[in-house]
Image (tube, rainbow, N blue to C red):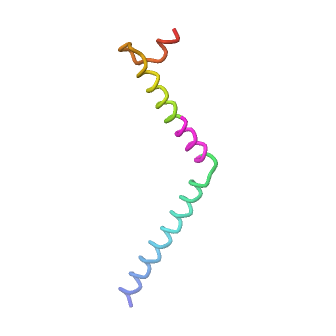
Amino acid sequence: MGLFGVLLIIFVSIFAFLIIAFVIRYAIDSSQTSRRLDVLIQEVRYLRAEVKRQNQGDSDDNNHIFDKKV
């Protein structure tokens, strides 16, 4: 009974840990802050792609955007 009891306690502990981790992960994924961060990351990717397209049209070796406006 001693070995079975220890194995049962270990199994229940691992199961409880997984449930807690799942609940925390779900709370983080469903929060508004993480959604806003996803939108922000997507916008940064679009801006990088747009900057690359604009820089490919330039004949200068300088790839800085700020130099164009100054």
Q: Which of 57 and 14 is in front in this view?
A: 57
Image side of residue 1 versus residue 45, left or right: left
User: Residue at 40% of width from left, 18% of height from top?
Assistant: 63
What residue appears at the point 52 percent right and 39 percent down from the top-left corner? 41
* 1 horizontally vs 15: left or right: left
Please tell me which residue lies in front, 63 or 26. 63
**Residue furthest out toward the right:** 32
Image x and y of residue 10, in percent: 41, 76
Q: Quadrant of the N terminus?
A: bottom left
In the displayed structure image, the side of residue 63 where residue 25 appears, left or right: right
Location of residue 5 in the rendering, given as x and y in whole percent from the top left corner: 41, 85
- Quadrant hosting residue 55: top left
Above or below for 17 versus 31: below
Residue displayed at 38% across by 87% down = 4
**28 above or below 61?**
below
Q: Which residue lies furthest to the bottom in this view?
A: 1
The range drawn in magenta is 34-43
Residue at image position (35%, 85%) is: 3
Number of numbered tags placed on the structure image: 0
The foreground one among 56 and 11 is: 56
Q: Where is residue 9 in the image (x, y as percent from the top left)?
A: 44, 79
Residue 30: image location, x then y, percent: 61, 55
- Magenta stretch, overall SS: helix
45 in the magenta segment:
no
Q: Is residue 42 magenta?
A: yes
Asked if residue 35 is positioned above or below residue 25 in the image, the reply reads above
Find the residue positioned furthest to the top.
70
